[in-house]
Image (cartoon, helix red, strand yellow):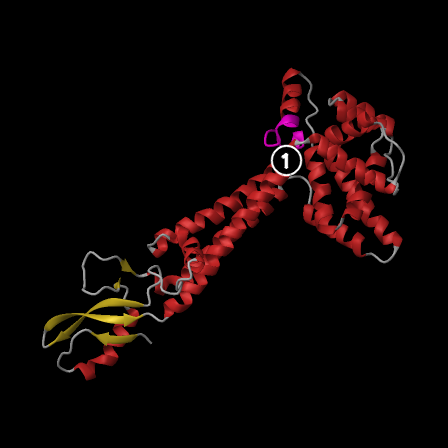
Amino acid sequence: MTHVIPSQRFDGQQELLPALSAVVHRSSEVRRYAEQPDPQQQRISYYQWVPLILIFQGVLSFVPCQLWRFLNRRSGINLSTLMDAAHVSSEASYLEIREKAIRYIVNQMDRYLLAQRDYRTGCCVRIKHFIAKVCCVIGGRLYGNYLISAYLMIKGIYVINAVGQLFLLDALLVNDYHLYGAYIVERLLRGQDWTQSERFPRVTLCEFEIRRQSRLHNYVVQCTLTINLFNEKIFLFVWFWFVALALVSIINFFQWLFRALYWPGQVQYVRKQLRAFDTTQREPGILAKFTENYLRRDGMFIVRLIGMNMGEVVAGEVLCGLWNNYSPERRLIAEKPGRKQLGAGARQNGGGRRMEIV
């Protein structure tokens, strides 16, 4: 219940106090506290909408996740199923179950990597392949950039979402909320009391009208908004949460962007994973073609995603299986895309090769 301290006494004050408390508690016309009432002072009305504001923020924070799921369904490969199979492989107690899970991942990835290609020929197609190899955000499913470009876009949306919600609260809370946490940190460093904030005032001037004997009487009283004791802590946590989320998302965005653009780093990652299971020396040129032309950015993205979530051992086994599937026919398809090569490769391959676990 909001406590009311009248600025002046009037007749029948004791009888009206309970009614005034209820009116002030529900009133949306609350002004910041000052020594004298000033009509030009900023009015605050957000405190009664705080639950709806927090729900709206939660919905906004959930939008990038739903957008990623929508884009993932259109990629041509089910990443959730691959992650489930990788989890089964990492937790399997029997070698047979582990091999079946790895074989499933390899077969799904191999089918995806060979099917999602532009098999047309011509100068324009070669130019598109070259641009897609240089820039990871240009191309699409047929050029091996769909998943990584969608993932980078979602990371960017997370950054915009976090920063945008800080400025959105400026409009909803009617104050400089995007600087609120910096203001609190500054006061703490100076050794000042940070609990007294103009952004969440605890003492205000409240206006209300009371009808007595067919006449309206306007009153301005000093109110205590105890709800702001909680609002202050809630929105302070929200500020630090969104700032931390924005910083982590920005760092992660540039990490993935660097991995996607820097092909020597991708080749080195593949070489390290294959060497952990097989010490046989491989020609650098063939390994580079395996990475750039067969796996491409989407294949490397899936392998790295498996390594980050399920462990580098599972990612290494998947890479070994894909390397064993990298037959001369697949090299021809990957390095020289075209419908004629695809048909010849299919005839030479016959019924297909089974994967071997190294």
Seen in the image, is 264 located left or right of residue 220? right
Is residue 235 part of the magenta span, yes or no? no
Q: Secondary structure at mark 1?
A: helix
Q: Quadrant of residue 269?
A: top right
Residue pushed farthest top? 123
Q: Residue at x 70, y 42 (%)?
A: 302
The amino acid sitting under disc 1 is: Phe
Q: Nearer the viewer, residue 143 or 254?
A: 254
- Asked if the magenta segment contains residue 142, the reply would be yes
Front-most of residues 240 and 311: 240
Residue 202 lies, in percent from the top left, at 33, 68
Q: Position of residue 324 (x, y in %)?
A: 85, 36
What residue does disc 1 label?
258
Q: Is residue 133 left or right of residue 286?
A: left
Does residue 275 appear to the left or right of 17 in the view shown?
right
At x 23%, y 58%, the residue is 41
